[in-house]
């Protein structure tokens, strides 16, 4: 029996995190391998409004609340106001990755789930440029219980780690960066935190906007009964859900991208003010055929808003990419995880698109 849509999201993000550590997020067949009986959604978005410049955007996942700001921008007519006709192309466990769709010419803008997917696409010969990041940091991390909380990399030493095959490089990278012994026991498990609750291990690899909700629904309280320690807190920072295009297309359509980003950021600004709006849009409209749960989607959106924000976004606006942060701590984390080669940040990041969007302000 296929997993619920909430489980799909946990599955994809955890699986992708593992592949990223191995440098394997490169093509659709790898994502399809974890899909089982699942299939990608080919609905999810209403037909784009007639008129205006047509723009195709390949999403990195199904049309759930993960793309909250885009749904608000579409629903409130922000794209229409910019003269755009935006078509969102859903992804899914058996769908091509967004970078594969972009490389094949099936989309103008791609939103790869993980930074490593973008890096792999560039290393495969694609002349892609990234100009925005939906999440300032990955919500991937570790879930532990109060009886043995894992708050630092040192707490992982000699611990029994429950997780999905492929996440081991991240566990080891955290320990290497902290200069503690790389010594732990790994037990592969599925995409539900029950083995942790059953005492089969000390810590469970998680996605901070998904599995913790499962524990909350069972009456447990974050910070008291369980703890979430993100990769960022262990020195493994990375941008997530990036927006990218081919260099030549961006050069020829720069004004269109600026308009799209301005409208999208308006949507994400609205989302931060009221996370219930996009959750309802995801459940009732854009992901109406996915069987999404409103309470779960609302809570997921509440949790993910924090990951869209950072000191950089507070001073310069949402979706900003800091090249120094990328080439510094983020690349150091990838290097510790064995990811190579790492492309020249100056050649693959364009910060001027959002400079034009924000015009020196922190909001649009």
Image (cartoon, rainbow, N blue to C red):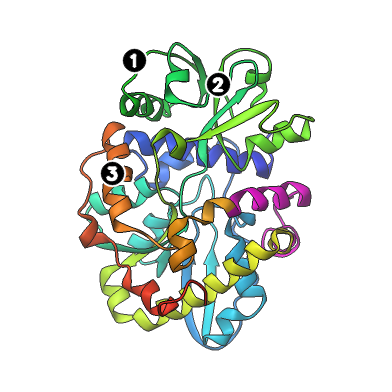
Per the picture, the main secondary structure of the magenta-coloured stretch is: helix
Q: Is residue 274 magenta?
A: no
**Residue identifier under label 2:** 203
Q: Is residue 303 magenta?
A: yes
* SS category of the residue bearing label 2: strand
Q: Residue at x 32, y 51 (%)?
A: 325
Crowdedness of circle 1 by 10 Å Cα count: few (<14), some, many (20+)? some
* SS category of the residue bearing label 3: helix
In the image, taking residue 146 as reference, residue 131 lies left or right, namely left
**Residue identifier under label 3:** 331
**Residue identifier under label 1:** 181
Horizontal and vertical percent position of residue 61:
54, 52
Q: Which residues are magenta?
A: 280-305
As measured in the structure, the alpha-carbon distance from the residue carrying label 3 to the one carrying label 2 is 26 Å
As measured in the structure, the alpha-carbon distance from the residue carrying label 3 to the one carrying label 1 is 22 Å
* The quarter of the displayed image where residue 245 is located: bottom left
Horizontal and vertical percent position of residue 78:
59, 80
* SS category of the residue bearing label 1: loop
* The quarter of the displayed image where residue 231 is located: top left
């Amino acid at each position: 029996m296929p997993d619920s849509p909430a489980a799909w999201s946990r599955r994809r993000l955890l699986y992708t995190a593992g592949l990223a550590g191995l440098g394997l997020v490169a093509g659709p067949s790898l994502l399809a391998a974890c899909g089982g009986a699942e299939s990608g959604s080919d609905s999810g978005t209403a037909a784009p409004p007639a008129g205006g410049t047509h723009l195709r955007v390949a999403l990195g996942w199904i049309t759930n609340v993960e793309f909250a700001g885009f749904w608000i921008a579409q629903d409130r007519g922000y794209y229409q106001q910019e003269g755009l006709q935006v078509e969102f192309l859903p992804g899914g466990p058996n769908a091509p990755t967004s970078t594969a769709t972009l490389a094949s010419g099936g989309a103008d803008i791609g939103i790869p789930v993980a930074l490593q997917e973008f890096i792999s696409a560039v290393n495969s010969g694609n002349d892609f440029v990234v100009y925005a990041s939906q999440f300032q940091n990955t919500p991937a991390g570790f879930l532990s219980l109060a009886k043995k909380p894992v708050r630092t990399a040192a707490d992982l030493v000699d611990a029994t780690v429950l997780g999905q095959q492929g996440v081991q490089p991240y566990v080891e990278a955290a320990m290497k960066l902290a200069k503690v012994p790389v010594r732990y026991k790994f037990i592969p498990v599925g995409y539900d935190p029950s083995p942790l609750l059953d005492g089969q291990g000390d810590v469970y690899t998680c996605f901070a906007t998904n599995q913790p909700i499962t524990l909350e629904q069972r009456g447990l309280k974050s910070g008291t009964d369980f703890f979430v320690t993100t990769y960022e807190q262990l020195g493994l920072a990375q941008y997530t859900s990036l927006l990218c295009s081919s260099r030549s297309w961006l050069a020829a359509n720069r004004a269109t991208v600026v308009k799209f980003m301005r409208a999208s950021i308006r949507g994400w600004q609205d989302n931060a003010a009221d996370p219930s709006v996009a959750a309802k849009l995801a459940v009732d409209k854009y992901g109406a055929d996915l069987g999404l749960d409103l309470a779960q989607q609302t809570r997921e959106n509440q949790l993910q808003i924090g990951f869209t924000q950072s000191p950089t976004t507070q001073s310069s606006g949402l979706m900003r990419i800091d090249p120094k942060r990328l080439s510094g701590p983020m690349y150091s984390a990838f290097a510790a995880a064995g990811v190579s080669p790492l492309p020249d940040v100056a050649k693959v990041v364009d910060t001027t698109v959002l400079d034009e969007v924000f015009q020196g302000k922190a909001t649009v």
